Amino acid sequence: MASMPPRFSSLRNRFLAALALVVGVAALILALIARYQIAPILLEDESRYASGELDRIERALGNERNHLQSLVEDWAWWDDTYAFVGGTRPEYVDSNLYAGALETLGVQLMAFFAPDGAPYWTAGFDRQGAFWSCAGHPEACEGSRELTDQLGSRIGQGLDEGTHSWLWAGDAPALIALTPILKSQEDAPANGWLAMVMPLSEALVAQLRETTGIELTLRGQTVEGAMADDRLERLSPTRMRVTRDLAALPAGQALRLEATLPRQRYQASLETFRFALVWTAGVLAVTLIVVLLLLERMILRPLRDFARFTQQLGRHAHDQQTPESLIGRRDEIGILARAFQHLRQCQRHQHDLLLELSQHDALTGLANRRLLDEHLGEVLARAAQGEHGVTLMLVDIDHFKAYNDHFGHPAGDACLRKVAETMRQHFSRPGQLVARTGGEEFTVVLPGAPPEAGPRMAESLRAAIERLAIPHHPYPRVTISVGVSHVEAGQARAAESLIESADAALYAAKRTGRNRVQVETALNRV
């Protein structure tokens, strides 16, 4: 009897190796999930958070724009302003358009336009902070010319009589509000337009930073084509920068809104996931240790005792009784031990009868396993001495259980006899042997057959069985699968090795669809 399995072939070590493999695969899967599932979700959430913060800044800018619109409407819908643009209130300039008034309003420029968009009067501060006020064409007030040209052009193109506002992305970013000049009470046509410009100064940006709690900057930017989507740049594990271009005047310009944000949200979510993962791994490790201890105590140790006992039977003490510690168990191992004890008793009673068994199968008339083993041992011995090579085939009837289940066992027996007779006719030369080695399994030994003849003869047999056209259900007809192995002349090879290689080839034929011949390869050769 064979000795105990090697260290790394024992049930315990194989189980531990399989468990380690499963744990490793699980860890790899978790790592892949974290990399390709969790991380993208967290990054997408971070992107939404960054866009939301830009929306918050944009809403704060919108509040400033609404405030400027209210200011320009208050001034434009005033009878004195209406009269001033109509040329009947010259004292309006001295009374209202002075430096203190603009500083109080928080605007940098006030521009009055005729109904056709021609500048009527402008007043404001230049870059050095000096106040100026002038009438007529803006050439007299060069500091406002680009802006007033843009607004005058839009008025001349026909704006609807409502309040309009824009962002200005010129040299000095600003907010612009423009509205028609109307009488406060009477329903009279507009007498021109009034524009106010509020600078997006560093003081206002600082106020926005304080209001939103966000580190932000605003600057003009040249753009080509359509506005780009929000851009997110992750500067470090703790900081990121997000940028958005806002539509602005003049054409081809945008006001770039840039915010630097902390990545606390992402880092907190990532740490939470890692924390949960570590705890899950810890709980799993403890669970596995407990399971291994229970497995060792309840299953592996009794199985080792059972294996040791069977080995002792192989060496000596054939009459030794199965240990009571195994027979007395009330689990599956106890059932196995009692069944083993019963089988030993039956073996002793039937030993003489088994020696007298015929060497041929009663149903098919073919050789049985005993004769096969004897014959195969002889031809392999001659092969090792260099007399000839040996080809071995394992033949299995495809889906034979389904055949028996559908047609019944008598029909199954008849099918076996037909297949056996066909095999006997194919391999009837001296030295060739066909044996029935299982319910629907047959073995063919072909001494002297060259390596290339085996697959050809197996294919001929397969085709012959298929030509019998024995009806099957639910398959069209009865077919066979064949596994072929070969040993060269002068090569020493054990019968078990030859059979196992043919068996591996047979199962390869089954896996690839049945009704075919498969020859042993370097991969399945034992």
Image (tube, rainbow, N blue to C red):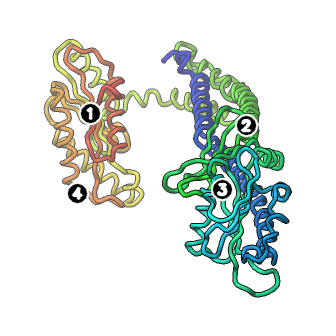
Who comes first in sequence, dot 4 or dot 1?
Answer: 4
Decide if residue 156 is on the left or right side of residue 272: left
Q: Nearer the viewer's eye, disc 3 or disc 4?
A: 3
Q: Name the one closer to the observer, 52 or 149.
A: 149
What is the x, y in percent for residue 334? 67, 32
Q: In this figure, which residue is indicated by the disc labeled 1?
A: 519
Identity, as a three-letter code, of the amino acid under mark 3:
Cys
Identity, as a three-letter code, of the amino acid under mark 1:
Val
Determine the image quadrant of residue 86: bottom right
Q: CA distance from mark 4 to mark 2?
A: 70 Å
Identity, as a three-letter code, of the amino acid under mark 2:
Gln
Q: Secondary structure at mark 2?
A: helix
Q: In this figure, which residue is indicated by the disc labeled 2?
A: 267
Who comes first in sequence, dot 4 or dot 2?
Answer: 2
Give the vertical position of 392 relative to 168 (above or below). Answer: above
What is the x, y in percent for residue 52? 71, 52
Determine the image quadrant of residue 69: bottom right
Who comes first in sequence, dot 1 or dot 3?
Answer: 3
Q: In this figure, which residue is indicated by the disc labeled 3?
A: 141
Q: CA distance from mark 3 to mark 4?
A: 107 Å
**What mark, if any, has residue 469 been given in the picture?**
4
Q: Nearer the viewer's eye, disc 4 or disc 1?
A: 1
Q: Residues within 10 Å of mark 1 (few under 14, many from 20)?
A: many
Give the vertical position of 395 relative to 212 (above or below). Answer: above
Who comes first in sequence, dot 3 or dot 4?
Answer: 3
Task: Residue lying at the far left in this picture: please name it.
Answer: 429
Q: Which residue occupies 22% across, 49% down?
A: 465
Q: Secondary structure at mark 3?
A: loop
Who comes first in sequence, dot 3 or dot 2?
Answer: 3
Q: Secondary structure at mark 4?
A: loop
Q: Which residue occupies 70% across, 51% down?
A: 54
